[in-house]
Image: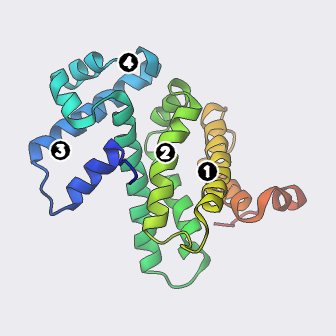
Amino acid sequence: MRNMSQGEKNRRSERDGGRVDRRVRRSRRAIIEAFDRLIIDKPIDRISVSLIAREADVDRKTFYQHFGSIDGLLDAIAEDVVSELLDKVELVTRASSGGPADRPLHAFFAALTEHLGKNLLLQQRYCEHVPSELLLEHLARPLVRQCVERGFVSGGIPDDELEMLLAFGLGGLFSLYRWWLLSDRRLTIAEMTQLACQLVEGGVPSFMEGGARPGSL
């Protein structure tokens, strides 16, 4: 049986009848917000549990009870981000009128654009201060799992083929947005999202043949 990440355990606990105490939610949120403040200025290898606990005004025991490790904290952050994005995708597709903007892929990119636009500096610092392979690993696990659980991916695809397909798609998408966040951002976030959507839907040839298509979202 697959072992659940700390983030997945936390999310499932919250879904099971809302049994999570308000104090637990508050302390978890304080720890995550403390980590976000620290990652603005420090690479992850210079951030310790003690430093996070001090910044969050909790003791180390509380941190370990909630997350187990910094790796578990990253799992929980990634789980929250993915859940927020895919919740929005579900809302859009459930109320779908059948237009292009209602398709899961377009709804996902719209949600991603909104999320990135909330705090570009924080997203940039995550890319600068967390190794790219570590960041992708933590984001990919809940994204792949939740896409399958929510029915965004056909259940008829063999597991090994699905893993290969998603690894390719997510790796390229992650690299593209990471490049944009660390660049001088001459492209707006809307233009970047349009390009990403075009590349995912049509591949590199669609872009090479005609460039980015205006108004594709």
Residue designated by label 4: 47
Instruction: Answer above or below: position of 78 versus 157.
Output: above
Residue designated by label 2: 139
Do residues under tags 2 and 1 come within 8 Å of each other at their CB atoms? Answer: yes
Q: Amino acid at mark 2?
A: Leu
Q: Secondary structure at mark 4?
A: loop
Between disc 3 and disc 4, whose residue precedes? 3
Instruction: Answer above or below: position of 166 versus 38.
Output: below
In front here: 4 or 138? 4
Do residues under tags 3 and 1 come within 8 Å of each other at their CB atoms? Answer: no
Q: Secondary structure at mark 3?
A: helix
Q: CA distance from mark 4 to mark 1?
A: 27 Å
Q: Position of residue 153 (x, y in %)?
A: 55, 69
Q: Is residue 156 visible?
A: yes
Q: Position of residue 9 (x, y in %)?
A: 28, 49
Between disc 2 and disc 1, whose residue precedes? 2
Q: Image point 44% across, 51% down: which residue?
A: 142
Q: CA distance from mark 2 to mark 3?
A: 22 Å
Q: Image point 45% across, 17% down: which residue?
A: 45
Q: Which mark is residue 170?
A: 1
Left or right: 211 in relation to 7: right
Residue designated by label 3: 25
